[in-house]
Image: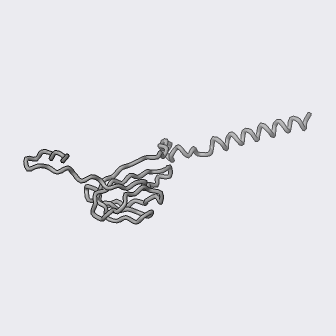
Amino acid sequence: MKRFSLRILSAVIAAGMASTWAWAVPDPAVGAKGATKSPVRFEMQSRTGTLKTYRAGKSVVIAEPDGRLKRLPVDPAARVDRNLVRGQQVNVISMTDETGQERVSAISRTAPPAAETADGTQARPRR
């Protein structure tokens, strides 16, 4: 009977230690000050700017409308328009993954702005 009681007592102590350890391990979703961290999500982003440099499968640098240069890594499987030329207006689509890394998934030329007539109205397209 004494041996059976020791086994039960050992099991209870082991269970208590395991639950204490489980409660003592910090939750990764909670920050150091107890604030809950927001989970990182996939996020798509589109940018328009002037193409400065493009290295296939490596990186792209664009000048954003405010003049700041933005360098982004390009995914090797990215869809890229042919014959990109430095100085062209481009649209860059990128995705931020679960680790917070941003990668370009598409680069395309943007359409030139519509021409205006002398009186400031939009010119009608030719037929």
Q: Residue furthest right?
A: 1
Query: With respect to residue 74, does 26 lie above or below?
Result: above
Q: Residue furthest top?
A: 1
Q: How many marks?
A: 0
Give 114 or 47, whichever is nearer the viewer.
114
Residue nearest the observer in this picture, 93 or 25: 93
Q: Residue at x 74, y 39 (%)?
A: 15
Where is residue 47 shown, x and y percent of the image? Answer: 33, 52
Horizontally, is 114 left or right of 94 in the view?
Answer: left
Q: How is the image coloured?
A: one colour
- For this orientation, the residue located farthest to the left is 119
State the residue at coordinates (72%, 42%).
Answer: 17
For the point 42% across and 55% down, the residue is 79
Question: In the image, residue 8 lies at what x, y percent?
Answer: 83, 36
47 lies left or right of 13: left
Closest to the observer, 51 or 22: 51
- Seen at 26% across and 55% down, the residue is 65
Depth check: 34 or 82 in front?
Answer: 82
User: Quadrant where the N terminus lies?
Assistant: top right
Q: Position of residue 105 (x, y in %)?
A: 43, 54
The answer to whether 35 is drawn above or below residue 69 in the figure is: above
Please tell me whether residue 87 is drawn above or below residue 4 in the rendered image.
below
* Displayed quadrant of residue 22: top right
